[in-house]
Image (cartoon, helix red, strand yellow):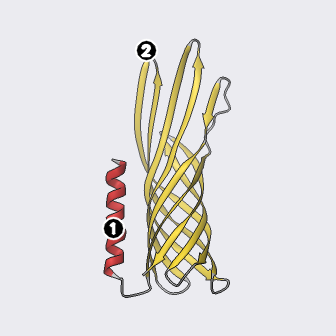
Amino acid sequence: MLKKNLFVSLLLVAGLGIGASASAQVYVGGTVGQSKWNVDCNQSGVSCDKTTNSYKVIGGYNIDKNFAVEASYFSLGKVKANAAIGAVNASAEAKGTGFELAGVLKHDFTEQFGGFAKLGVARVSVDTKANVPSAFSFSEDTKSTQPVAGLGLTYKVSKEIALRGEFESRRVKIGDEKNTVNNFSVGVQYTF
C-alpha cells in the first residue's frame, strides 16, 4: 500500500512538473528526517522508541514571490513499544502516513537565503498493531483530518535548485487518542 501511495504521489508531482515546465512557478522536491511522536510511555515496565525516520515528497505552486500552495505525501515512520506482562513480552507499533495541502508564506532574506511558514490540513492514516503472544492480536487503521504547521529555511544553490530544511508539527489520531508528531527534515527542491 505504501509503495502504491508513493508511486501515485510521484506521478502527481511529475505531472505538475510537465504541465508547467515553461514557467518558474512549479516546484517539486523531497525531504528526509526524523519524527518524534508525543506518545505516553511513562508506565512501569514499558519501553518505547518514540523517534523514527521520516520522508516527504513535495509538489508546489508559487502564486507569487511571497505565497505558494504545497501538496505532499509524507511518512512519519513507525513508533514501537514493548512491555513485559508477567513472563510474556507484549508489543505494539503505530505507523503514520498521509497527504497534506498547505498555504506557504515565503520571504527572501538575501538572494540565496529564504524562509517560509506554512499552515494547512493533512489527511493522516495511522496503522496500529498490538500483540500479546498466545493471548490476542489487534490491528486498527485510524484515518483523520488534522492541522499541520511548519517553519523552514531554503538556500538556493542555483536558479532551479534549493536546499530545504524545516520543522513541522502535525496532530495524529491513534484510536480515540490525539497525539502530536514533530518532524525535522532536510531535502532539496527543484523549481521549473
Instruction: Assign a secondary structure to mark 1.
Output: helix
Residue at (33%, 67%) from the top-left corner?
Answer: 12
Question: Residue tagged by mark 2?
Answer: 134
What label sits on residue 12 in the rendered view? 1
Residue at (63%, 37%) from the top-left corner?
Answer: 40
Q: From the viewer's perspective, tell me whether residue 173 is left or right of residue 34.
A: left
Give amino acid for label 2: Ser
183, above or below 66, in the image: above
- Position of the C terminus, as image quadrant, is bottom left
Residue 65 location, quadrant:
bottom right
Give amino acid for label 1: Leu
Residue at (59%, 52%) from the top-left corner?
Answer: 34
Residue at (50%, 35%) from the top-left corner?
Answer: 93
70, above or below 24, in the image: above
Instruction: Assign a secondary structure to mark 2.
Output: loop
Residue 120, percent from left and from top: 51, 66
Residue 88, percent from left and from top: 54, 15
Q: From the viewer's perspective, tell me whether residue 106 is left or right of residue 56.
A: right
Quick one: label 2, few (<14), some, or many (20+) residues within 10 Å? Answer: few
Residue 29, percent from left and from top: 46, 69
Front-lying residue, 111 or 93: 111
76, above or below 68, in the image: above
Residue 119, percent from left and from top: 55, 68
Q: CA distance from mark 1 to mark 2?
A: 44 Å
What label sits on residue 50 in the rendered view? none
Front-lying residue, 17 or 46: 17
Upstream in sequence: badge 1 or badge 2: 1
